[in-house]
Amino acid sequence: MPSHQERADELYEAINQLIRVHQFRDRDCICCHDVSVAQCYALETLVKRGPLRLQALADEMYLDKSTTSRVVDALLRKNYVLKVPDPADQRAVQLSLTPAGKALYRTIRQDLVTEEAAMISKLAPEVVDGALTLIRQLTAAARARLGP
Amino acid sequence: MPSHQERADELYEAINQLIRVHQFRDRDCICCHDVSVAQCYALETLVKRGPLRLQALADEMYLDKSTTSRVVDALLRKNYVLKVPDPADQRAVQLSLTPAGKALYRTIRQDLVTEEAAMISKLAPEVVDGALTLIRQLTAAARARLGP
DNA sequence: GTCATTCCGTTGTCAGTAGCAACTATAAGT
DNA sequence: ACTTATAGTTGCTACTGACAACGGAATGAC
């Protein structure tokens, strides 16, 4: 019967491994398209949250606004996002996806999910469902410590 | 009853979230010490696998040898690793941890596990054990696709 | 209404991450 | 001995990420 500490240690280790393997795979999947991992993450955030200001996007991504500004710059150059000045506040900008940006994200997402599907093809559906629930609980617990 | 595709999609999403939250937390935990995330990963690999050649270290970390060489350089400058020429092969070097390197990794690891422990403090032990098993299965499945 | 303060986004700078290609030196195969 | 393969380093390029300083716009105090 492992102690709380031992459990924490093993879980940290296990998550660490999972992260490495996924990270590596994602890089491969994403970078063979036109964008980097961070750029893809920005696309994803805009898909999920809709048009955002720069600061809001930075907050969502847990990044500094300067870093975010440069990531967005790269996406602007490639015509995947649109930057429109906010009429209500001359300082602010609204960032949104172009059709090309939406299409690119769909494609990449498709690739990633296909990879994931191949990965779990040998696991029983109950196992996957169980993992899903538990991973969500872990994420919620982690976010709770991160947030306020 | 979700389809295989739907399951893959949800699982991808869930793992993605977990990765982001952990990544962010790890950066905070690690970088307040003397090393970056990649440098810490190199320390970790040397702790686990013992002394390694540069190429072997690069393989373990899924990185290019040039990238690895520079990461090791940084650790050398800070006196956390030792580089000894291999007597059996004049081209090769043996990388090992200095006592300072071992101590630093222990400290960081302690911090990370403490964080993990706090995170799971509100979850039932059975939940954590379940997550552990499932995450390991997922990692194994992912590694199987990655490897050969 | 003006002035200080705060907020939004950009830019400069610095350190780190990462891969590819070219290079040196050593080792191994023929 | 000559070719080929391997080990590690270095040059280059692009991206990541934070902090600090800045200019312009909004807001609050008075």
Image (spheres, coloured by chain):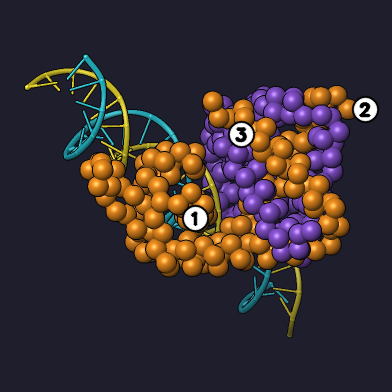
Chain colours: A purple, B orange, C cyan, D yellow
The Cα–Cα distance between marks 2 and 3, rounded to whole angstroms, is 28 Å
Q: Position of residue C6 (x, y in %)?
A: 68, 70
Quadrant of the rendering where the C terminus of chain B is positioned: top right
Query: Closer to the camera, A3 or A34?
Result: A3
- Please indicate whether residue A38 sits to the left or right of residue A135 in the image: left
Q: Mark 3 is on which residue type?
A: Arg
The chain ID associated with circle 1 is: B
Q: In what quadrant of the picture does the N terminus of chain B appear?
A: top right
In screen coordinates, is B123 left or right of D4? right
Question: On screen, B70 above or below D19?
Answer: above
Q: Do discs 1 and 3 share a chain?
A: yes
Q: Secondary structure at mark 1?
A: helix
Is residue B61 rendered to the left or right of residue A16?
left
Judge the density around disc 3: few (<14), some (14-19), many (≥20) Cα neighbours within 10 Å: some
Tell which tag, 1 or 2, sits nearer the viewer: 1
- Numbered disc in front, either 2 or 3: 3
Q: Which residue is mark 3?
A: B143
Residue A89 percent location from the top left of the image: 71, 54
The answer to which image quadrant residue B96 occupies is: bottom left
**Do tag 2 and tag 3 residues touch (Cβ < 8 Å)?**
no
Instruction: Report whether A53 appears left or right of A20.
Output: right
Residue B46 x, y percent position in the rendering: 46, 52
